[in-house]
Image (tube, grey):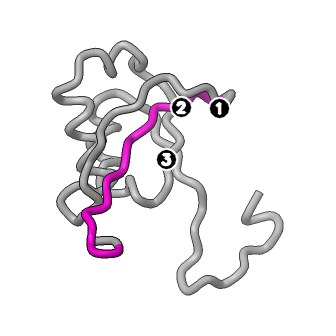
């Protein structure tokens, strides 16, 4: 709940140039509909979304998708996730680059 209303979020498929390829949803923003669950649902049930992806594509995801990394790799994608530090400690320049 957000300000006494259900919070709804769309899921967007965005190209590397920032072009929005597709918008899916809206999904409720709760623990059942996290980024990983929405990704799995999208790839298993939405055939039009599968037109955007091919095997061995590189998918850059944030930490919200960490529960879907194994699933995405099994589907044939090359998954990349930026480096994150625990407890908000700053990374060195070389480690962050």
Q: Residue at x 61, y 26 (%)?
A: 19
Label annotation for residue 52: none
Residue 84 position in % (x across, y down): 57, 68
Q: Which residue is tagged 1?
A: 18
Q: Is the residue 70 above or below the residue 51 in the image?
A: below
Neighbor class of circle 1 (other Cα within 10 Å; few <14, some 14-19, many 20+) is: few
Q: Which residue is tagged 2?
A: 14
- Which numbered disc, 3 or 2, marks the residue closer to the eye? 2
Q: Which residue is tagged 3?
A: 61
Residue 6 position in % (x across, y down): 25, 63
Q: Is the residue 96 above or below the residue 76 in the image?
A: below
State how far apart marks 1 and 2 are (Cα).
6 Å
Badge 1 marks a residue whose secondary structure is loop
Residue 95 position in % (x across, y down): 73, 65
Residue 38 position in % (x across, y down): 27, 45
Neighbor class of circle 3 (other Cα within 10 Å; few <14, some 14-19, many 20+) is: some
Query: Is label 1 in contact with label 2 (beta carbons under 8 Å)?
Result: yes
State how far apart marks 3 and 2 are (Cα).
11 Å
Magenta-drawn segment: 3-16
Upstream in sequence: badge 3 or badge 2: 2
Q: Residue at x 29, y 57 (%)?
A: 34
Q: Is the residue 48 above or below the residue 61 in the image?
A: above
Q: Is the residue 1 above or below the residue 18 in the image?
A: below
Q: Quadrant of the C terminus?
A: bottom right
Indicate left or right for 14 with 32 as reference: right
Check if residue 54 falls in the magenta segment: no
């Amino acid at each position: 709940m957000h300000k006494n209303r259900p919070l709804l979020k769309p899921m967007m498929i965005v190209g590397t140039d920032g072009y929005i390829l597709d918008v899916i949803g809206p999904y409720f923003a709760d623990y059942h509909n996290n980024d990983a669950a929405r990704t799995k649902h999208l790839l298993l049930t939405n055939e039009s979304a599968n037109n955007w992806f091919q095997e061995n594509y590189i998918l850059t995801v944030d930490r919200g998708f960490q529960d879907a990394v194994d699933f995405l790799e099994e589907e044939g994608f090359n998954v990349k996730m930026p480096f994150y530090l625990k407890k908000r400690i700053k990374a060195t320049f070389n480690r962050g680059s």
